[in-house]
Image (cartoon, rainbow, N blue to C red):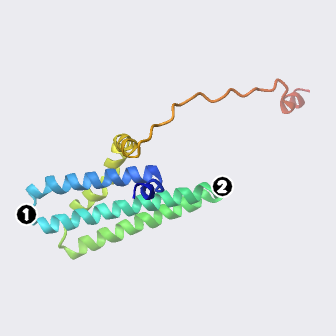
Amino acid sequence: MIENVKKINRALLELWIGILFTGLLCQFIGMWFADNKVLYSVALWIGIVLGLITVVHMYRTLDRALDLGAGAQKVVTTANLVRYGCVVIVFLIVLLTDVLNPLITFMGLMSVKVAAYLQPFTHKLCNKVFHEVDPIPEPMPVEEIDDFDSNTDMEEH
């Protein structure tokens, strides 16, 4: 199972762990204060699942855009609009049903932001679980600069 998990992009896996940790934390803390525990849980986990999906969508969009070159900006912008459109649709459904609390759903979605801040900790956790260490950063080699620049010399003469 660990070999299958290692195949997932590491940053994506670390964000998922952070999102799920934040979701569980919100679940256990919020259960003490919620009037209707079932509706609280459903609203929270709709937001968390939405957060997990948006992270995957962002990853796939950026991965695809890195291969495109000049057309990448259009692809990323379109994907962002689609992603935010889907989030708005989910929130409209939550609002219009008048059963779930949209603020709790929003709190679940914001677990993505918390997970981004937790990423250094989840990275260390994943390193321990996978028995890995980060490479030691080394300075990049210095490139030699040519003294002769043909464009500069042509403009001067």
Task: Tell me residue 21's x, y (percent).
Answer: 27, 52
Q: Is residue 50 left or right of residue 76?
A: left
Q: Is residue 120 left or right of residue 79?
A: left
Q: Is residue 96 left or right of residue 77?
A: left
Q: Is 71 located above or below residue 120 in the figure? A: below
SS label for mark 1: loop
Q: Is 118 located above or below residue 152 in the figure? A: below
Judge by depth and name the residue closer to the eye, 132 or 59.
Answer: 132
User: What residue do we see at 65% from left, 55% from top?
Assistant: 69
Mark 2 vs mark 1, CA separation in Å? 52 Å
Quadrant placement of the C terminus: top right
Q: Please identify the quarter of the rendering in which residue 147 is found.
A: top right
Task: Tell me residue 64's x, y (percent).
Answer: 57, 60
User: On residue 69, which mark appears?
Assistant: 2
Q: Which amino acid, mark 1?
A: Asp
Task: Tell me residue 76's x, y (percent).
Answer: 54, 59
Task: Tell me residue 89's x, y (percent).
Answer: 35, 71
SS label for mark 2: helix
Find disc 1 in the rendering and name its residue: 35
Quadrant placement of the N terminus: bottom left
Q: Earlier in the sequence, mark 2 or mark 1?
A: 1
Residue at the extreme right: 157
User: What residue do we see at 89% from left, 31% from top?
Assistant: 154
